[in-house]
Structures are given as C-alpha cells and as structure tokens.
Image (tube, helix red, strand yellow):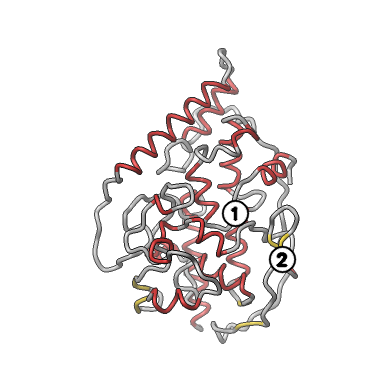
Amino acid sequence: MNELDDYEKERIANIKERDNLLASLGLSTSSKNIFGITAKTKTKTPTPSSAEARRKRELRAKEASLRRVIEPVRRSGRLAQREVEMKGLVEDDDLTPPPPTTTMKPQPLIPKAKTIHLAPGPSYSSSSIEEIHERAPRPGRGVDGRLLFEGRWKGAFTPNLTPQEMFEGGAFGGGFFADTYSNILKSELSSKDDIPSLPFVVPNPTKLLSNTDPDGENNRFRVRAGQSLQEWEKAGWIWKEDPRGWAQWYTRFWEGRRCQDDERQVRRWMKVAGPTGRFKRALLRKLSQSGGRNAVKDEDVGAVLRQCLWQWGYEMNEIEFDRAMNGE
C-alpha cells in the first residue's frame, strides 16, 4: 500500500470521528499555544490579559443588551426554544450547541440555504504526492466583492478576502508563520523561510505573521479563535506539502498553484463559510437575534464567529447578509 493511501485512510478516519463536533473546524481552545509556537513542551492554559478579559465582558454585556431591546415582553414556547438553540453560541470559548431539551422542532431563524455542488475535477496520480498541475491566474473580483476562481471552483469557492487582506487585517493571533515544529515533516518550520516566499508583503510582519506570543488583540476582531498546529495535525487536517495548514494552502491556491489537495480544502471551506457553512449560519442566527441587518455593522455582535470566518477568507458584510437572507 503506498504512502498516499495510508495518509488518506488515516485522514478519513480522523474526520469521521469528529463529524458531530463543531470544534472539528477549529474553534475550541484559548490556549496561549494556540498556533503551535512550541510542540515539545506542555503549556498551561494562560490567564487572559486584562485587555482580553475586558473585551470579553464588553461583548457579552452588549449582546445581552441587544437581546433585551428586541425581545418581546411576553415569551412564547417557540421563542424559548430558540433561546435554548442559541445558548451554546453565547460563550466565546464554547461553540458547541447544547442538545435540545424538548421534542419540539426548533423554528429556523434564517432561510434555508441552497447546497452548492462542486463540479467534477481532474484525476490525480497516487504515485506522487508532490504532483502539481498547470498554474492558474489569480482570481478577479466580482461587483459583490467575491473572488472569481476559474473552472470547477466558479460559484462554489467564493471567499471575499484575499490571503493578503486576511493577514493584514489580523488573523491567527499574528502567529501563523511563527517558528514551530511540524510533526508531519518531523522538522522545524522557519518564519525566515516561509514569510519571504509569500506573494505579497504584510506591514509589521513580526506582529501579524511571526508573533511568538499570539494574542487575540492582534486579530481583526480582537478575540481569540483557533486551535494549535499540533491539534490540526492530530485531527488529520494537515497535508505535508502545506505543513502550516489551510491558510498556507489558500495563499498558494490564490497565487495560482493547483494540486491534489485542492478539492479537500475547498470542501472544508464550504462547510465553514459556504451557503450551508456551520459558522456562517451560526453568525447569521446571532445577527438575526441581535437586530438583523442593522447588527451587521456592529462588529461586537458575533465577534468570535466573525474572526473564525475571517481566518477562512470570508467577511460577513451587508451584501453577504442580504444574499444569505434571500436563500443564496
């Protein structure tokens, strides 16, 4: 049995094991080692900085205030059930929804989304993991802000942030390209090697790319969101040609590289930020609960979910909200 078959079997087994967990897409830890700065020492969960703790209190108070404003004085059974449905999404560090407490089917807060099907693609040789196919041009941008990838990706893979915009805005606590150890390659990953190879330049890379102490304050929405590289590796999400993970693959895909891992990564994106993506739908529910379209510009509403989506190349804005509420 060749190396690729072993890799695929192990990856599929890991994914099946975590199918029923929202945390399977990378939102469950607040560890200071959140981006795998070290792989050889066991770290304790850090005490949040005073700024992070204050920020968290402010977000919770604000969301609670918004709910009080829009909720009716009298509460129906259906509204009470919706509150149960959303309760697990209020806590920043636990995005796993609780089990239903009644047999009544929860009423949807947002329209049902249309499932997007990915068109068939080319076959890949299993004899060479490093097989790379013909390069593609960088994507253009539609009037709605979405990136326009060609071929089978058109209409299915529609992020609205380029990798450069994602990192410049603040992602992964500023530590995605920090020096770390790869258990997949059994070797060190160096920021001095990876950052110069990027097809763009990010201002203040020490803070935004190679920060050895990743911090939620470095993120676009000033909150923590994500797991460590070691946790991604254990989950079977890392392909050896992109040992740092999804955002490294996305940067190379955006630049034009095409390879055998493209379909897997695009399908992962669709499960997060596509029309039926878990975190996109969760954010839409939170926005609907907090005032609908008027809440979109209030970045404190659903800040953790917004940050997660940002790290997947997607920003919820008014255009995206309108499309989702129209069932697109």
Res. 10 mark: none
Q: Residue 92's spot in the image, x, y percent? A: 42, 41
Quadrant for residue 290, please give it. Answer: top right
Which residue does the image show at 50% across and 61% down from the upper left? 167
- Pointer 1 or 2: first along the chain: 2
Label 1, secondary structure: give it.
loop
Q: CA–CA distance between discs 1 and 2?
A: 16 Å
307, above or below 292, in the image: below
Quadrant for residue 81, please give it. Answer: top right
Res. 314 mark: 1
Q: Which residue is mark 2?
A: 140
Extreme residue in the top direction: 74
Q: Residues within 10 Å of mark 2 (few under 14, many from 20)?
A: few
Q: Residue 267's spot in the image, x, y percent? A: 62, 61
Label 2, secondary structure: give it.
strand
Q: Residues within 10 Å of mark 1 (few under 14, many from 20)?
A: many
Going by the numbered disc 1, the residue's amino acid type is: Tyr
Q: Nearer the viewer, residue 184 or 34?
A: 34
Q: Residue 5's spot in the image, x, y percent? A: 52, 77
Which residue does the image show at 56% across and 28% down from the upper left? 82
Q: Nearer the viewer, residue 37 or 161?
A: 161
> On the rendered structure, is 290 left or right of 234?
right
> On the rendered structure, is 18 left or right of 321?
left
Query: Closer to the observer: label 1 or label 2?
Result: 2
Which residue does the image show at 48% across and 67% down from the upper left? 245
> On the rendered structure, is 92 left or right of 43?
right
Q: Residue 299's spot in the image, x, y percent? A: 53, 41
Going by the numbered disc 2, the residue's amino acid type is: Gly
> On the rendered structure, is 2 left or right of 149?
left
Q: Nearer the viewer, residue 128 or 305?
A: 305
